[in-house]
Image (cartoon, coloured by chain):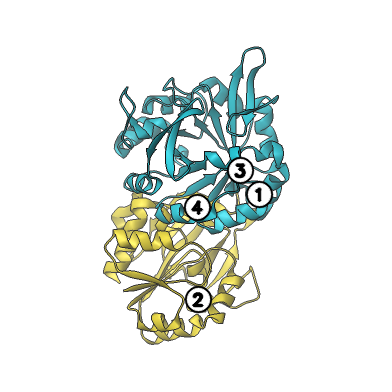
Amino acid sequence: MITVIDYGVGNLLSIRNMLHRLGVASRISGDPADVMASAKIILPGIGAFGHGMTRLKSLGLDEALNRRVLDDGVPILGICLGMQLFSRRSEEGEVDGLGWLPADSVVFDNTRLRPRDRVPHMGWSEVAVRGNSRLLSPGDEQSRFYFVHSYHLVFDNPGEVTGWSTHGYSFASMVESGNIAGVQFHPEKSHRYGMAVLRNFAERY
Amino acid sequence: MIPVLLLSGAGLVKTVRFGRPVYVGDPINTLRIFNEKEVDEIVVLDIDATNRGQPPDVRKVEELAGECFMPLAYGGGITTVRQIAEILHAGAEKVVLNSALVSHPQTIVEGARRFGSQSIVVSIDVRHRLLRGNRVFTRGGTRANDMDPVKAACRAVDLGAGELLLNSIDRDGTYQGYDVELVRSVASAVPIPVVACGGARNVSDMLLVVQEGHASAAAAGSMFVFQGVHRAVLVNFPNVSVLDEQLFTPLGRELDV
């Protein structure tokens, strides 16, 4: 059973419906007890970093996630803001992130964008797979994914990044570090390419 | 290549020249069919909302967005920034504003400022008038505005629109092909993507409006929901390899945005 964490940031139905289509059992829940009882977790999210983190804390989900992911090694997939919350902090706000990944969340660097590159980055982009990825296979280079974001992660050591995309410059769009995985794009809005990512998370993690 | 679905009441309809709505099916079932295809975006417009002066049905958006395994642009009856916020929060990626270009321009300005231009699509409905040439119509094509489409497009850009959906009312549902000249006149006048709509019969029409009309994408309604000359309802979408071959290869992948 995959728990899709509901902390009040965005519509989670398309994630649940896509998992259902794949024949993967899931439930949407914001109850820490469900997090403690689940074998796999998806942390979705859109919007502001500080707001998302504050919501997790006020529901007691940060503690449950720390115990389940860090102590018990349960696989977790962060999507968009969900992945960014795994980092230490964001330029966006004062609130610290979960701090699981040696990375910070930064806004797209305007000085490195071309005039036609808007922020937020919104649209379909490719993901170049690097290193050992379980979410995508090297043969999936043709895959395209839908992105909507103004911030991206910058890692101390780019070795943990398994997918790179380009918006003006190259940024980390997929990370896989042990039981912790994250994607900057929205698999639930990337039709069959996104389905492959969710299926791989369900089967290979 | 973008399907445009029209909501009326609880069902989906297809129009001819913005009139004669014919029921084509249940929205959820139709979206599920498109989920099987490689549709890169879908547009759903509530054609009752504006005409009846109703606000957008956010519950409906939530339900539709939950069934969409692709980005959703939703329009119909949007007049306030609060409605834009609610629709985006309900799971749509973009909102489509039409009558607001004339009646609530400040909503476009404020919406673009708060959510980014990329989320704000302005749709422009154009009908040819005998002595005046191409003119913009609002309120589902019922209200004439003495505005030239190119001027309307430039105004939408100035207000903060990130994308235009350009409809030819005269071609809507007619399978006569796109009004390529209209599309080119607008696309060459604005720096933002222009999605052409109205008149598509087949993939060749789409290719033409992209290559000759400089549209950044081609949208269609009837072509995706009817089959054959008798307009039998059959939701369909061209095979992606055919699309790639005919649409994208000649122009390179940068089109494929």
Residue B234, by quadrant, is top left
Give the foreground label among 3 and 4: 4
SS label for mark 4: helix
Q: Marks 4 and 3: in contact by CB < 8 Å?
A: no
Q: Is residue A41 visible to the viewer in this orientation of the structure?
A: yes
Chain for disc number 4? B
Quadrant containing the N terminus of chain A in the rendered view: bottom left
For numbered disc 2, what is the local secondary structure? loop
Indicate which disc residue B162 carries: 3
The residue carrying mark 2 is A102
Answer yes or no: are tags 1 and 3 on the same subunit: yes
- The answer for which chain carries disc 1 is B
The chain coloured yellow is A
> Which quadrant would the C terminus of chain A be assigned to in this image?
bottom left
Q: Residues within 10 Å of mark 3 (few under 14, many from 20)?
A: many
Q: CA distance from mark 1 to mark 2?
A: 34 Å
Q: Amino acid at mark 3?
A: Gly
Which of A97 and B123 lies nearest the eye of the viewer? B123
Residue B218, position as x, y percentages in the image: 46, 33
Q: What chain is the cyan one?
A: B
Q: Do residues under tags 1 and 3 come within 8 Å of each other at their CB atoms?
A: yes
> Which labelled disc corresponds to residue B61?
4
